[in-house]
């Protein structure tokens, strides 16, 4: 069986090589469609993916999270995900190869050497916003599928291909919606395995990530003349006392995820130099390497302690703008081992499990699957350092190797 799979992997790799030009062309075409988020311009991207899936003989479905729930998040509607499936004989296991359609903005276009939506090739590199994050992975999906068909491989498990929305803003209407209800509502089984195609250099696989707690606190003070501050309550001072208390949090460290981090992103209050500020806003971006409940409890205790100590410590509002659990399937999961084995056999590369991808600890869309009990990993080709940067690119060789590895994983899991 093992030998059979190796033979199949070689066969499918050859077919990918045969389709090299198309793989490059499709990546270029996708880069040429701006799908910047925010706001999330998906119309033409989703149409294109529908067209591409159809061209490979699939029957894609467009799946949008419900309008009401999308609007509650302050987002425009519709936000179309595209799903397609190659059915296996036994329909199990279900493997989902996924990549997001949105890209971040290009920033100052004059800084770019090549046009950000040009998809130009220079020295074997495809340039443009989204070239490696992550339109190359959308293109790879299509060629993987084609190579499997051309190699005459009949899958046992189902292969689901998804082009999803809103990864770049970390919002729910993409894989969050699909995994919670979208797949089922549209007649697809939930995946057993999921790869969020992202540029991790093929040598690192994201299997854990710190959580994310974004607090916004508004303090209410009392305005007064700056020459007589005792008459007022200085809201900025209250915010500073909270900041000091929060920064005293005892930082914990996880071997893979690194340490908890705390960032004060906004401290905003006051109108004039000679007026006691009556209002102040402060925000904390806390990324816990332990369960988020530990931090939430610390925050609640801190608010209560300061309130008890100081009758003027008055909070107008507390909002939790992001509330992500710490987690992931971890480095010992069999799916991680499978990726390591297949990739090493195919490329000689040793894959290292990571919980701190590029230092800021992200699982991409694998966050949504792994918190829902599915084996989700963030993995793909291209160097993460180039993502979101000026003159983003993927090399043609990286692109081809990524498609081969993905095809190898499909054969391993569904073959
Ligand atoms: Zn990405």
Image (cartoon, grey):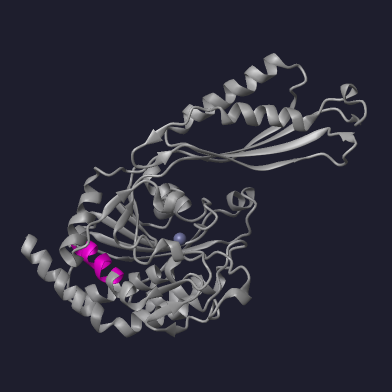
Q: Is residue 228 above or below residue 281?
A: above
Residue that appears at 55% across and 53% down: 66
Residue that appears at 34% across and 66% down: 381
Q: Does residue 296 appear to the left or right of 125 in the view shown?
A: right
403 magenta-colored: yes
Residue at the front extreme of this rendering: 227
Q: Quadrant of residue 310?
A: top right
Magenta-drawn stretch, dominant element (helix, strand or loop): helix
- Number of numbered discs on residues: 0
Q: Name the quarter showing ligand 1.
A: bottom left
- Quick one: quadrant of the N terminus? bottom left
Work out whether residue 69 or residue 100 is closer to the camera in this orientation and state it.
Answer: 100
Residue that appears at 75% across and 29% down: 237
Q: Position of residue 120 (x, y in %)?
A: 47, 83
Q: Position of residue 344 (x, y in %)?
A: 18, 60
Q: Does residue 2 appear to the left or right of 244 in the view shown?
A: left
Q: Quadrant of residue 159?
A: bottom left
356 magenta-colored: no
- Quick one: quadrant of the C terminus? bottom left
The magenta segment: 402-411
Q: Is residue 331 visible?
A: yes
Q: Quadrant of residue 148?
A: bottom left
Q: Position of residue 177 (x, y in %)?
A: 48, 51
Q: Is residue 88 visible?
A: no
Q: Position of residue 265 (x, y in %)?
A: 63, 44
Work out whether residue 230 or residue 411 is closer to the camera in this orientation and state it.
Answer: 230
Q: Is residue 114 above or below residue 225?
A: below
């Amino acid at each position: 069986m093992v030998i059979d799979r190796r033979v199949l992997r070689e066969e499918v790799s050859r077919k990918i090589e045969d389709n090299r030009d198309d793989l490059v062309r499709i990546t270029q075409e996708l880069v040429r469609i701006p799908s910047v988020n925010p706001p999330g311009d998906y119309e033409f991207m989703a149409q294109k993916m529908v067209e591409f899936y159809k061209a490979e003989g699939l029957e894609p479905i467009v799946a949008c999270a419900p309008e009401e729930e999308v609007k509650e998040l302050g987002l425009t509607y519709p936000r179309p995900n595209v799903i397609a499936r190659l059915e296996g004989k036994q329909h199990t296991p279900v493997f989902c190869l996924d990549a997001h359609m949105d890209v971040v903005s290009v920033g100052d276009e004059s800084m770019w050497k090549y046009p950000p939506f040009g998809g130009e090739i220079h020295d074997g590199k495809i340039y443009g916003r989204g070239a490696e994050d992550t339109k190359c992975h959308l293109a790879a999906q299509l060629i993987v599928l084609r190579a499997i068909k051309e190699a005459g491989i009949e899958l046992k498990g189902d292969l689901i291909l998804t082009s999803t929305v809103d990864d770049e803003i970390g919002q729910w209407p993409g894989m969050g919606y699909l995994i919670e209800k979208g797949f089922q509502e549209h007649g697809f089984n939930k995946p057993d395995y999921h790869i969020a195609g992202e540029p991790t250099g093929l040598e690192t696989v994201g299997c854990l990530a710190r959580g994310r707690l974004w607090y916004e606190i508004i303090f209410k003070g009392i305005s007064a003349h700056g020459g007589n501050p005792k008459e007022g309550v200085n809201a900025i001072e209250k915010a500073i006392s909270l900041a000091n208390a929060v920064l005293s949090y005892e930082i914990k460290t996880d071997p893979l995820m690194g340490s908890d981090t705390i960032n004060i992103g906004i401290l905003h209050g006051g109108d004039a130099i000679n007026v006691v500020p009556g209002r102040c806003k402060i925000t904390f971006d806390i990324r816990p390497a332990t369960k988020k409940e530990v931090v939430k409890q610390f925050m609640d205790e801190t608010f209560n302690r300061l309130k008890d100590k100081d009758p003027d410590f008055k909070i107008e509002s507390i909002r939790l703008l992001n509330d992500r659990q710490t987690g992931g399937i971890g480095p010992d999961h069999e799916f991680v081992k499978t990726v390591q084995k297949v990739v090493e056999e195919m490329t000689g590369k040793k894959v290292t499990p990571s919980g701190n991808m590029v230092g800021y600890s992200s699982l991409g869309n694998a966050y949504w699957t792994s918190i829902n009990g599915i084996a989700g990993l963030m993995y793909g080709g291209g160097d993460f350092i180039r993502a979101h940067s000026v003159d983003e690119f993927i090399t043609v060789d990286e692109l081809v190797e990524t498609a081969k590895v993905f095809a190898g994983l499909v054969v391993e899991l569904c073959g």
